[in-house]
Image: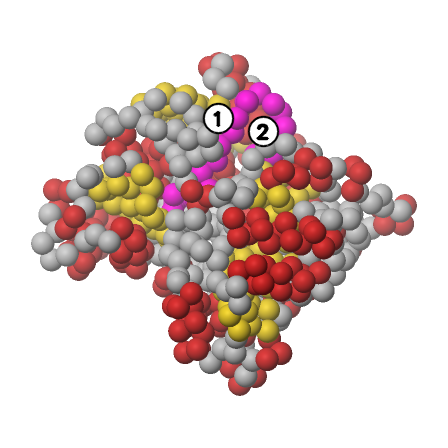
Amino acid sequence: MTAILGISGYYHDSAAALVIDGKIIAAAQEERFSRKKHDPSFPHHAVNYVLSEAGILLADIDYVAFYDKPFLKFERLLETYVAHAPKGLRSFSMAMSVWLREKLFQKDLLHQELKKIDKKFNREKLLFSEHHFSHAASAYYPSPFDEAIVLTLDGVGEWATTTVGIGKGNKLDIIKEIHFPHSLGLLYSAFTYYTGFKVNSGEYKLMGLAPYGEPKYKNIILDQLIDVKADGSYRLNQKYFNYATGLTMTNKKFSQLFGQNPRKPESENITPFHMDIAASIQAVTEEVMLLMTQNLAQEFSIPNLCLAGGVALNCVANGKILKQGLFKNIWIQPAAGDAGGALGAALAVWHKELDNPRQTTQTDTMQGAYLGPQYSQAQIEQALSACGGIFETVPEDKMIELTAQALTQEKTIGWFQGRMEFGPRALGARSIIADPRSKTMQKNLNLKVKYRESFRPFAPSVLREDVDKWFELDADSPYMLFVADVQPAHRISMTPEEQALFGIDKLNISRSNIPAVTHIDYSARIQTVDKNTNQKYHALITKFKEYTQCPMLINTSFNVRGEPIVATPEDAFRCFMGTDIDMLVIGNSVLYKHQQNKALKENYEEKYELD
């Protein structure tokens, strides 16, 4: 037996993953245990979890693989500051104090942290992967392909910001790179900052805001900020940015270019200007990714594409690459960001360093991304009793029936089943679910349950066998990473008066027979549900379809704004009591809000720092 522990950390989204003899055993983000969103600290809880899932100790681990190379990152930092000196002295001083105190000697730091778990841990077991190779490995090795082009895009790793790799068998080689400070991920993050959202967590809000605007500033971005070549390679004009050596993403010239200062988070309204800015950077991002993938398809004539890195979470761009039809198959790592680097680093050791062969499967080897902890019925009942919950436990078929009936009555339901998902998306294991046919559900879920901006869209979980009847998609999308349009037969045309409305004013106009999951441009971020991957969730949607002829549910993550997705029955009960969720279903236990002790209600709206 060869056991490999993968770790990511010290930037954001720390995680741990365990691979034994090439099989993915477990993976989880530290935030789920610490309850601190995007927790960057050493993933003690996640490491302990993945070891316990396998029933082994750290002493049984053969290799520990860290997801990037600190010395290369330090080299980039130094060279960047030297190139821009004397600019950025304050930022340089702050960065150096952290590096000299913690990051420069990261092998020592990792060794110390691992010794807290096992006093006899041997530092010779520690290996380091390059950041973008970890991303590429996380995308290619679990994919169902024997050969693939592997494209990774994010903010920055050590030097690389965009890479192209070729995977064949167990071989994976990076053949092209774009280096810092030129970064599509940092360009998108600059606009995230400019529109008043939090960098490294609010990028998906920018993507959700984009359909409310018009890409009026697209040409300005292409003329002034980014020089895009015919093959999709690019360079950024650094005179408009501050991220290389400063404390902000953009500078005064950037603000002057667009005519406004950055929006102050939470304190200023989102205006049509911000919607148009969002639409413009989204359009540019899509153009760059489409050019890149067109060129790669022509250059290599390989029918399979794998994607990873934070930019690969841009499901609108992914949907357009899929619709373009240049690749027969596309597979995206569900934990595409830094958390997935932990898994990629472990798989890279097994396949690249140890030269072990790959065994591909028809779908992938991610097991639906259900790689986190699960709880027995006895553990669930014990936890709920300790929390003071009032519940009934029923057979599974009765639990499915009660849940489906409640959904038809427009109840919002906390759904907690099986193993927790790995990655940023809830996929029917730690989800809040509801009826997509409701005209008021999107607004109510956002404002009364999630405590977040009203414009944020919700995704449908749809039976795989029915997806093409409702959406312009006939492909697997198990990880909610593709956007496609609602089929014309299910759309509702807008009246001239409705078409004259702008931006958020269009929010409450029903676009289709499933308005709660139809964005204002008739699109939806789709999760396909297969009975072989998630039998219980598939059974619930099937029962709902029996009652309604609608083969899908709203699926949003089981948390409130700023909170990590719930991990334990206790987390779920607290979130249930702190929101307007009507019903909680954990395992075979069913709880109704009106039956609970009102003294247990929490103020969840202000419990977590806003994301």
The CA span between labels 2 and 1 is 10 Å
Viewer-proximal residue among 355 and 547? 547
Q: Amino acid at mark 1?
A: Leu
Residue 256 found in image quarter: top right
Residue 320 lies within the magenta run: yes
Q: Residues within 10 Å of mark 1 (few under 14, many from 20)?
A: many
Please state the extent of the stretch shown in magenta in the rendering: 318-340
Residue 68 lies in quadrant: top left
Residue underneath mark 2: 321
Report the residue that reaches farthest toward the right: 496
Residue 524 magenta-drawn?
Answer: no
- Above or below for 195 versus 387: above
Q: Is residue 220 visible?
A: no
Q: From the top left corner, tell me how far across and down residue 358 is, in percent.
A: 32, 28
- Report whether 409 appears left or right of 63: right
Whether label 2 touches label 1, CB < 8 Å: yes
Instruction: Name the residue: 49% across, 55% down.
Output: 429
Query: What residue is pinned by disc 1?
Result: 305
531 is higher (above) or lower (below) than 101: above
Q: Amino acid at mark 2?
A: Ile
Instruction: Label 1, secondary structure: give it.
Output: strand
Q: Is residue 501 visible?
A: yes
**On the rendered structure, is 250 left or right of 316?**
left
The residue shown at (63%, 32%) is 474
Q: Secondary structure at mark 2?
A: helix
Q: Residue at x 23, y 26 (%)?
A: 355
